[in-house]
């Protein structure tokens, strides 16, 4: 086995370990409450995003979110039913963001 093959194998195993740990953290969070934390929302986004440059990938990396684009991407993610409960929890998190609050609710807070 070449050193390049060995490095690729170690990298793959490390990624698998990280994915397993992420899944454990997400499952525990979903088990303990209705609303996920921003850290877990970002972890889910990192797990389900559609690729580099997407709204969920940017949210996972930076915490900055374009809610409309993220919701559209999540809508497409729901086709993957393996992690549907994760995606639904992420959707709920985004919908609860203050920037997504209905205008009437915001007007009531300002008045």
Image (cartoon, rainbow, N blue to C red):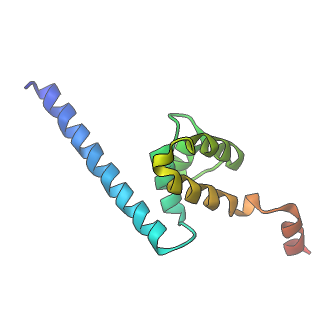
Q: Is residue 59 above or below residue 104?
A: above
Q: In this view, does 110 lie to the left or right of 14?
A: right
Residue depicted at 75% across the width and 58% down the height: 100
Residue depicted at 24% across the width and 45% down the height: 14
Q: Position of residue 6 (x, y in %)?
A: 13, 32
Q: Which residue lies furthest to the right in this view?
A: 111
Q: In this view, does 53 lie to the left or right of 8?
A: right
Q: In this view, does 76 lie to the left or right of 26?
A: right
Q: Quadrant of residue 21?
A: bottom left
Residue depicted at 48% across the width and 53% down the height: 44
Q: Is residue 7 left or right of residue 33?
A: left
Quarter of the image with the N terminus is: top left
Residue depicted at 66% across the width and 47% down the height: 71
| Residue 46 visible to the viewer | no
Quarter of the image with the C terminus is: bottom right
Q: In which quarter of the image is residue 105?
A: bottom right
Q: Where is residue 19 in the image (x, y as percent from the top left)?
A: 34, 49
Q: Which residue lies furthest to the front in this view?
A: 81
Q: Position of residue 25 (x, y in %)?
A: 39, 63
Q: Please give the count of numbered marks on the rendered protein.
A: 0
Q: Nearer the viewer, residue 32 or 49?
A: 32
């Amino acid at each position: 086995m070449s050193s390049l093959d060995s490095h690729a194998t170690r990298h793959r195993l490390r990624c698998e370990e990280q994915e397993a740990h992420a899944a454990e953290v997400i499952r525990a969070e979903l088990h303990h409450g209705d609303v996920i934390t921003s850290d877990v929302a970002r972890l889910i986004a990192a797990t389900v995003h559609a690729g580099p440059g997407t709204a969920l990938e940017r949210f996972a990396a930076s915490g900055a979110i374009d809610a409309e684009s993220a919701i559209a991407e999540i809508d497409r993610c729901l086709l993957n039913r393996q992690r549907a409960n994760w995606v639904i929890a992420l959707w709920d998190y985004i919908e609860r963001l203050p920037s997504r609050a209905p205008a009437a609710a915001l007007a009531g807070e300002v008045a």
